Image (tube, coloured by chain):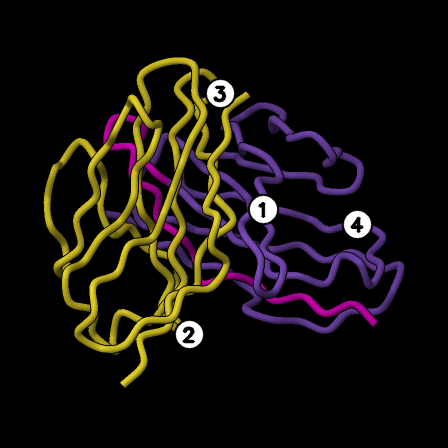
Amino acid sequence: AQRVTQPEKLLSVFKGAPVELKCNYSYSGSPELFWYVQYSRQRLQLLLRHISRESIKGFTADLNKGETSFHLKKPFAQEEDSAMYYCALFDNYGQNFVFGPGTRLSVLP
Amino acid sequence: SAVISQKPSRDICQRGTSLTIQCQVDSQVTMMFWYRQQPGQSLTLIATANQGSEATYESGFVIDKFPISRPNLTFSTLTVSNMSPEDSSIYLCSAGIVNTGELFFGEGSRLTVL
């Protein structure tokens, strides 16, 4: 079955430190993976998608099919990065999205 | 991109009553979904809203409890029927275009059932 896991419920780092939010998936097919972010009092929004291979707000994510992972990384965390981050997979068979449980990132001053 | 408007943004309801949440998208989209988000928890897909036909429900959700309509490409409603305190949650409408694979979200409707 299609599944997305994010092992860390909460991740706290100091400003300027590197951050990595882990995401693993199980999917029988070629996955389309995304990271969504929800800042305090804002709606959920797309951060980045793996097919774009882009860096958004300093964040990058590489799809590793061997490890079935799509970890989100940023070399130097900023306080404004504090938010809830969700890893998501688009299920081509069911034509819907499967979301991970989310990781709350807290960047401390 | 798509802007999604949801209403009501919040409501306090009595046990046993029903409430309908409306979702309006400002552009034509192919996919519309309804999610539930418990405080501090992830998104749980309730159903896919299908235009002009019955919604596709996920395991644990049934049409009698969560009837959904989608009369056209840009509008959908979710009704939470015969509410109990366990239904207290944030209900999110989302929409997207299948080719882009990107989902846009409404601000959510926070329901509190007393």
Q: Tell whether A71 sits left or right of B12.
A: left
**Rendered shade, chain B:** purple
B27 w.r.t. B106: above or below? above
State the residue lying farthest toward the bottom: A109
Which residue is tagged 2? A41
Are there few (<14), some (14-19), or many (20+) residues within 10 Å of tag 1? many
Amino acid bearing label 3: Gly
Q: Quadrant of the C terminus of chain A?
A: bottom left
As helix, strand or loop, the secondary structure at mark 2 comes to: loop
Residue interval drawn in magenta: B96-114
Mark-to-mark CA distance, 2 and 1: 23 Å
The chain letter corresponding to yellow is A
Which residue is tagged 1? B77
Tell me the tag on residue A70: none
Mark-to-mark CA distance, 1 and 3: 21 Å
Which residue is tagged 4? B81
Mark-to-mark CA distance, 4 and 3: 26 Å
Which chain letter goes with mark 3? A
